[in-house]
Amino acid sequence: KDPVPAGVYGWVNANNEGVSQMINDPRIAAVTVTGSVRAGAAIGAQAGAALKKCVLELGGSDPFIVLNDADLELAVKAAVAGRYQNTGQVCAAAKRFIVEEGIAQAFTDRFVAAAAALKMGDPLVEENDLGPMARFDLRDELHQQVQASVAEGARLLLGGEKIAGEGNYYAATVLADVTPDMTAFRQELFGPVAAITVAKDAAHALALANDSEFGLSATIFTADDTLAAEMAARLECGGVFINGYSASDARVAFGGVKKSGFGRELSHFGLHEFCNVQTVWKNRV
């Protein structure tokens, strides 16, 4: 209920040069970044040169694993919500759907039907599910990724087109038969595009999930709690969600590994990123 004390929080709208000046300012002790891999690398390099602590929360290509024994209805519902929230423009959104072959066709059919039913339009209208993308160039880049993936052999099951008219709208899109050598698997899809890959079994699904330069979050849908825990321990990412899609919560740590960054945000772990530990030792003789 108390107001934030003066000087604790400030807002500065700065360009690249202004950010560089702030990082090098002696009054700044540490830096945290939420953004692209390119932005994180640039700011991280500047912080390192200035010998200042840096936390990087960058991109992701989060796997969403669905095993044969999963609750299909719940998995599809979570998959659609996890992929298309905020028009797919979420770093920790589900992007690579890795589905065990025994349930793959049923999952794909239901997922496509649910994605096709999403309503696109003004995001301020509550009935709409998909709004515009942030910028025209980001929409163009996403469309190029879709076209490249199709040229590489992916099957376009839904969407794959820029919507004419005002706004940066892109149709809800589903790609199937995506393999690890394709653009949709290797790159981050920062928009309403889902890539479906079929796995032979749980071990193969785990290997596919880890076959990425990113490691932010992951999801596992299975009825086997023991298997889910074993897979979670082997997933190369900062957070694992079992039978639910990924999200951030102020009570738990959030962050990634690999090119998804390092350090943690939120919870006491996020606060401790910007604290120093001092050792005081008395009467050591």
Image (cartoon, grey):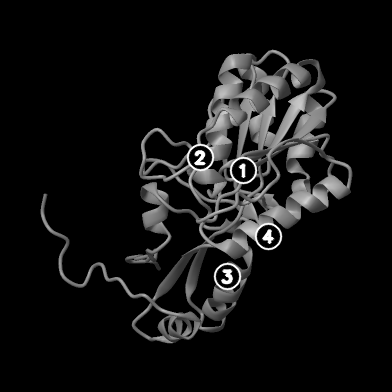
Q: What is the C-alpha distance between the residues marked 4 and 1?
A: 14 Å
Residue identifier under label 3:
39
Q: What is the C-alpha distance between the residues marked 2 and 3?
A: 30 Å
Viewer-proximal residue among 229 and 24 = 24
Q: Which is in the foreground here, disc 2 or disc 3?
A: 2
Residue identifier under label 2:
120
**Residue 225 visible (yes or no):** yes
Figure quadrant of residue 226: top right
Decide which of tag 2 and tag 4 comes sooner along the chain: 2
Amino acid type at mark 2: Met
Amino acid type at mark 3: Ala
Residue identifier under label 4:
141
Q: Secondary structure at mark 4?
A: helix
Q: Secondary structure at mark 3?
A: helix
Q: Which is in the foreground here, disc 3 or disc 4?
A: 4
Amino acid type at mark 4: Glu
Q: Dot 4 surroundings within 10 Å: few (below 14), some, or many (20 or more)?
A: some
Residue identifier under label 1:
171
**Are the residues tagged 2 and 3 within 8 Å (C-beta)?**
no
Q: Is residue 48 left or right of residue 201?
A: left
Decide which of tag 4 and tag 1 comes sooner along the chain: 4
Q: Is residue 209 left or right of residue 53?
A: right
Q: Position of residue 222 (x, y in %)?
A: 64, 18
The furthest residue to the left:
2
Decide which of tag 2 and tag 1 comes sooner along the chain: 2
Q: Which is in the foreground here, disc 4 or disc 1?
A: 1
Amino acid type at mark 1: Ala
Figure quadrant of residue 44: bottom right
